[in-house]
Image (cartoon, helix red, strand yellow):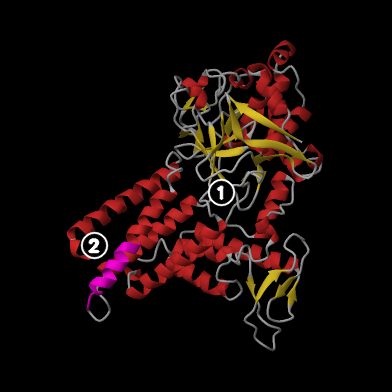
Amino acid sequence: MWDMTKHGNEDVPYEARTSEELGRYLVAARDLAPGDLVLTERPLVFGPKSQPNPEAAVPCVGCYKLVTADAGERCSRCGWPVCSGHCPGLTNSRHHGVECHILSVRPECVLDNIADYYRYDALLPLRCMLLQIVDPEKWKKLSDMQSHMECRLPGSEAYDEANEFIVEYLMNNFINKLENNVKKKYFPDISAELVHKMCGIIDTNALEIRVPDGVELLALFTNTCIMEHSCIPNTKHTFTQFAKDKNDLYRITVKVVVPVEKGNHITTMYSHALWGTQARRQHLKDTKYFACRCLRCSDPTEFGTYLSAMKCLGDGNQVCDGIHLPEDPLDDETDWACNKCSIKVNNSQVNMIITQMGEEVENVQMIGISVTMLENLLCRLSTFLHPNHYHLYSIKHSLIQLYGRQPNYMSEEILDKKIKMCKDLIAITKILDPGNSRLSLYNAVLQHELHSALLCKAKKVKCDGSMETVGKIKYLMIEAKSAIEIALDSLKDDIEETSGKKLFKVIVNSKKDFEKFCKENKGYF
């Protein structure tokens, strides 16, 4: 089953189809090339995510600018933190304008237990339900979205968590306190079950938007949510952060990043491209309620990157230099078999080891990164993991940002090590994200650090006191020029987003310094 949608007088570049296995999905209506627009649409509704440290700072409910939680201004009607009593979003129905009437039934302000008192993750479900009166047409589109309530039954983790932190919070503190006539005015249909359904729709369909000061929002889109997941997506989406027409705020634009032939599926990604297959598939099962069977998940080697592979340690009597891969990566209980000997390891053992290692990597990166700690961890984990394993990728990505930038790590040997590490990670990144759709910031950092190391090597006096030959310096400079240009190109779609904007500025300054150096040393170019 399919239908062709029209946009003005032009056919859009996709067809919407339906199957029992995939539900609704999109295919290319014609051959599509990188850069081709797939769709663009305004969000049905959006709202802030739960805040990582609400005791320190929270977003204004009108514009999402971070404000001091305990000392900032409050909305004069409902008491929620705001940037200013004059914030335009406080009266805008797409932001705080309507929900304020509901939240104001509990007008008192508090300075303690802010995280429990102001639950920002409850605002989006509330805004969803308020669409019944704000925009009935949007409400109908929202209600038709997949909620997977059959997987979110009482007793399930998703149901119980939503019930404790969102459903009971909204019902007990606000909705049940409304006068009956007021309740009917704002909520023609309202119940705990309906709030649960909204939570299910959000969990299944919402996309994350990072606004300029770093706050994360969740937004729901009518057509974008139909797009099928793939761990090697062929599209990239961006959001409008600044718009002349305020209704275009957070508009999504989806573009093709690799060629898509007519009839092929148009895909996006709902997981992390740098997680191994089992981690990605488990995340998708837990959050999107499906088991991914894409080409990457089906390949034990993940397209030859070996991102999940482990080293074989032999049988205790004889050393083996083989690697362990899952016999069937789509089977959660699969054994992991060595490619050189008969040793097998069961999946539960692998999961336990990888989880423990992941916690170690996370802990080291959280407590303050140092070269020594990262190198020690890299050395220890390298005993068990393939050099390309995603845990080692994470450690190396941190290391390359320290090598060549700290006084004790500027030697020729360190620079050569950094250059090789950068090139190895770039090769993995290019395979996993050929269209630069998900790992653009990672790639930009890698290319920028490669540029930095090559330039530093070109300037450096060698161990024997001599300089590199003119020919070698010219070669290093050409390679450095290419790397910095690739780094900037990687960020062309990320400049409106906070992290992308900051990184772009850093790389632009590096390019200026590089061009100045080239000008002063014309003989090398």
**Foreground pick, 441 / 111:** 441
**Residue at 74% of width from left, 51% of height from top?**
291
What residue sits right under mark 2 in the picture?
Answer: 525
Range of magenta residues: 466-479
Residue 158 appears at what percent x and percent y? Answer: 74, 42
**Foreground pick, 188 / 435:** 435
Q: Amino acid at mark 2?
A: Phe
**Foreground pick, 277 / 50:** 277
Q: Amino acid at mark 1?
A: Pro
Q: Nearer the viewer, mark 1 or mark 2?
A: 1
Q: In the rendered view, would you say 52 is above or below 513?
A: above
Q: CA distance from mark 1 to mark 2?
A: 36 Å
What residue sits right under mark 1 in the picture?
Answer: 259
Q: Quadrant of the C terminus?
A: bottom left
Residue 382 appears at what percent x and percent y? Answer: 56, 73
**Foreground pick, 154 / 296:** 296
